[in-house]
Image (cartoon, helix red, strand yellow):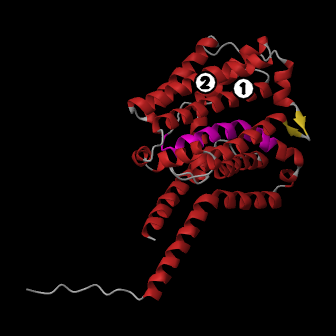
Amino acid sequence: MGIAAKTPTPPPEQAAADVRKAERTDRIVGTVQRQGALAVLVVVVLIALAAFPNFRSFDNTGTILVAAAPPMLIALGMTFVILTGGIDLSVGSLYVLGGVLAAWASQYGFVAAFAAPLLVCGAIGVANGLLIAYTRMAPFIVTLAALLGARGLMRAISSEGSETFLVKSDAFRRLGNGSFLDIGYQVWLVVALVVLGMVLLARTRFGHAVYAVGGSADAAALMGIAVHRTKVWVYVMSGLLAGLAGAINAAKLGSGVTVLGTGMELDAIAAVVIGGTLLTGGAGTIAGTIAGVLLLGVIQNLINQVGNVNSNWQQVISGTFLALVVVAQTYLVKLRRVS
């Protein structure tokens, strides 16, 4: 009977060195994953400052921030959804529905212009969350149905899209076009909500639950986390923020335009993923999402600066960024597991 050969045990010094190397690799990979979009944004901005004199103006910065305000709100809600391992394809339709409802309700005053889109879009978010959490239906199917339903509701309200409601409330219109310290009111509103979202995600039990559910719903349930309730709330937040984004856009335009929102859900997903949030959930930050939204906004602004480039190239560039980031994320996840 043979004697099995024993695997030689590495000396303690070598084992400690291997552990330190693995920890160092994990830190580097994690930093690249979280801060990659910010690094690319800084590089693109520096190139733009050097190449385009008009890019350096304060007015142009304000233009970028105002244009990024509605997408930022949608991407903020999408960050919470994707962190749980879900997806929300309905936000583009909720965005245009929110704008139409806000413009229609503005005839009844400032409060009504805000309340109508929040109530309706929030209710659709509740329906999405309940179906996904308690029936275990795929988020893709549920939110695709909501996309079609919200778009249909918008068309019904606006007579098949032929009627455009004008904003009647002067106070509501000032929200979209007024400014404080030469920065638009809607930008300040978005900044406040982003800060609130950061605190909610990083400093509360709900935020910890979001990460835990995205990491492993089964493990989160064993830890005593209310998995179903967490999933419902992230879809409610997504619906509310998409409706609010539509409302502030209506305030800016002075009307509820019915042809907007197409593809915004894909732009939001792209911004979130480019910002370092894993599509599988459990890892990501709101700061990364901000960098992703601003990066896409700066690219669009540069395309406008060039002037003779078709704006559709932004979609090509966004898609290329998204593909590269997903490939990079897959590699980084494998590298962290190996280390």
In depth, the one of 165 and 211 nearer the eye is 211
Residue 36 occupies quadrant: bottom right
The residue carrying mark 1 is 247
Q: What is the residue that sits farthest to the left in this orientation?
A: 1
Q: Position of residue 163 (x, y in %)?
A: 68, 12
Residue 312 occupies quadrant: top right
In depth, the one of 209 and 169 nearer the eye is 209
Determine the secondary structure under disc 1: helix
Q: Position of residue 323 (x, y in %)?
A: 52, 53
Say above or below: 54 vs 131.
below
The question of residue 204 being in magenta is answered with no
Going by the numbered disc 1, the residue's amino acid type is Ala
- Residue at position x 47%, y 80% in the image: 18
- Residue at position x 60%, y 30% in the image: 239
Q: Position of residue 159 (x, y in %)?
A: 62, 10
- Residue 25: which numbered mark, if any? none
Q: Where is residue 281 in the image (x, y as percent from the top left)?
A: 50, 48
In depth, the one of 185 and 41 nearer the eye is 185
Determine the secondary structure under disc 2: helix
- Residue at position x 74%, y 29% in the image: 249
The question of residue 72 being in magenta is answered with yes
The residue carrying mark 2 is 121
Going by the numbered disc 2, the residue's amino acid type is Cys
Q: Which of marks 1 and 2 is nearer the N terminus?
A: 2
Give the Cα distance between marks 1 and 2.
11 Å
Report the span colored magenta.
63-86
Report if residue 281 is visible in the image: no
Say above or below: 118 vs 335.
above
- Side of 51 where 247 appears, left or right: left
Give the prevailing secondary structure in the magenta stretch. helix
The local crowd at label 1, few if under 14, some if 14 to 19, many if 20 or more residues have their Cα within 10 Å, is many
- Side of 187 where 321 appears, left or right: left
